[in-house]
Image (cartoon, grey):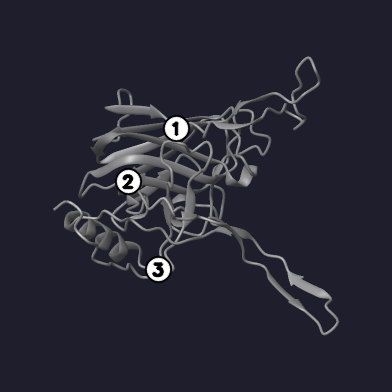
Amino acid sequence: LYNNRAIATTTTISSSSAAYGYEADTNLKDTRLAKKWRATGKDLEVLVFSDTINAIPATYCVIQSHNLTSDATVTLQGNDSNEWAFPAFSITVPGIRVVSYLQDGSDAYILDGNNDPIWGYDYSSKRSKDNDVRIVTFAKQGFVYWRLVIADAGNPDGYVQIGNVYLGESLTLPAMDPAAQVPYKSSSIASKNATGQLYGDKRIRIHGGTVNFPDIDDALKQEMEYMFDVVDITTPFILLVWENTLEYFPPLYCNLTKDLEYARVKDVQG
């Protein structure tokens, strides 16, 4: 997910409310997740994305770096006018339903009759609340106006906030090489002194790797090059490594670090 029309220069973002310094049109167009739109309320807040020059095409909506609770209701709507009594399109944007040990409101494990943690489905992130992502995909739609309607009455912060919204189409690639790896890496720096004492600067952990696609035709090659033209190595995008199993491997907010590289392969069809 790389061609984010929510942050395009021709797109205007307006909101039902905004705290000072947390305005939607400024902060949501900033690709840094730390820059957030923050509403002044939580019961019913609205974000509107509009492009009156060209309709905004989309097949995905992703919300990340937010403080929404698992009870929040988020609805994506599309329309060709800024009147919303009967929107032409409407769909819920849920959290990722991950497999995990179930926990109660105090983060204690829910136990079965044998005092063993119950293994089931939950809508909280596998790793931490900060990594929680809401995502929905749908058949391609194109509208001049899109809006997110957010209701999170139980939010203990007293407001809702979001760091990034993706609204746009996707580039689907064929099966990757089975030998491809996406390791869980550390960006920390470590060194030892002359006696072997370890010193370190602990930093964030990241995913990173090189993915090979052994079966690329010319049409797909051109699409990949267009993506590279858009993001280069300077603009982050959202990668769904295994699109149909996001409960096991959630979306990655990432960037390219190398150029595209091609190699001609032997034609095995003849």
Seen in the image, is 23 located left or right of residue 199?
A: left
Instruction: List the residue tagged with mark 2.
Output: 168
Callout 2 secondary element:
strand
Q: Mark 3 points at which residue?
A: 233
Of the pair 266 and 253, the residue shown nearer to us: 266
Q: Which of marks 3 and 1 is in front?
A: 3
- Label 1 SS: loop
Q: State the mark number for residue 93.
A: 1
Mark nearer the N terminus (3 vs 2): 2
Vertical side of 173 occupied by 119: above or below? above
Q: Which residue is drawn at 25% across and 38% down?
A: 143
Between 137 and 142, the one lying in front of the other is: 137
Instruction: Estimate the x, y position of residue 58 in percent, counting from the top left.
Output: 29, 41
Q: Which-is-in-front pick, marks 3 and 2?
A: 3
Residue type, label 2:
Gly
Is 210 positioned to the left or the right of 85 in the image?
A: right
Q: Position of residue 84 (x, y in %)?
A: 33, 28
**The residue tagged with tag 3: helix, strand or loop?**
loop
- Residue extending farthest to the top is 113
Q: What residue type is labelled 1?
A: Val
Choose the circle earlier in sequence order: 3 or 1.
1
- In the image, taking residue 65 as reference, residue 119 lies left or right, namely right
Mark 3 and mark 2: Cα distance apart in space: 20 Å
User: Can residue 27 be seen?
Assistant: no
